[in-house]
């Protein structure tokens, strides 16, 4: 359903997360030793929004919001917002 957050689409999210790694590293001025998507939610809009929990170090996580436009628009995946200093057990909630 359009507009609601859905924890589905396994397999697509890790690729979307990896596509914005360099955008996040540039914004926070830091290189991450790892970048592993561990949890996600999706939202159908005029394209797709993803909330993704990413492990960036042994005990360090970030929450990212990613927008993927509709295929016919041929636009790159974009990092739209992020939250740093998150832990393994922090809830992945809309922000």
Image (tube, rainbow, N blue to C red):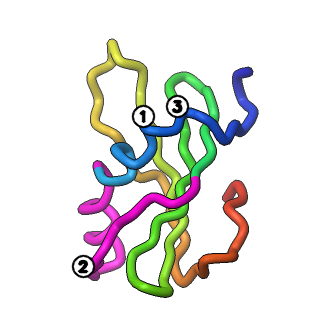
Direction from residue 47 to residue 25 in the image, left or right:
left
Q: Earlier in the sequence, mark 3 or mark 2?
A: 2
Residue closer to the observer: 60 or 76: 60
Q: Secondary structure at mark 1?
A: strand
Contact (Cβ within 8 Å) of mark 3 with mark 1: yes
Q: How far, Cα to Cα, is label 1 from label 2? A: 23 Å
Residue 91 in the image: above or below residue 84:
above
Instruction: Please name the residue that numbered disc 1 is placed on.
Output: 68
Residue 87 in the image: above or below residue 10:
below
Look at the image and give the residue range highlighted in magenta.
19-39
Residue 71 in the image: above or below residue 82:
above
Residue 37 belongs to magenta span: yes
- Would you identify the image quadrant in which residue 15 lies? top left
Q: Residue at x 40, y 49 (%)?
A: 14
Q: Secondary structure at mark 3?
A: strand
Q: Secondary structure at mark 2?
A: loop
Can you give x and y, in whole percent of width and height, for residue 68 in the image? 42, 34
Instruction: Please name the residue that numbered disc 3 is placed on.
Output: 48
Residue 15 belongs to magenta span: no
Q: Residues within 10 Å of mark 1 (few under 14, many from 20)?
A: many
Q: Earlier in the sequence, mark 3 or mark 1?
A: 3
- Would you identify the image quadrant in which residue 43 lies? top right
Q: For residue 47, which numbered disc appears in the image?
A: none
The mark total stands at 3
Q: Residue at x 50, y 76 (%)?
A: 61
Instruction: Please name the residue that numbered disc 2 is placed on.
Output: 31
């Amino acid at each position: 359903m359009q507009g609601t957050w859905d924890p589905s689409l396994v397999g697509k999210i890790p690729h979307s997360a990896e596509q914005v790694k360099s955008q996040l590293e540039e914004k926070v001025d830091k290189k991450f030793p790892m970048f592993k998507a561990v949890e996600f939610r999706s939202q159908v809009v005029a394209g797709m929004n993803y909330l993704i929990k990413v492990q960036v170090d042994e005990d360090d996580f970030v929450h990212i919001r990613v927008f993927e436009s509709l295929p016919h628009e041929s636009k790159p995946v974009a990092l739209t917002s992020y939250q740093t200093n998150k832990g393994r057990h922090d809830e992945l909630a809309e922000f």
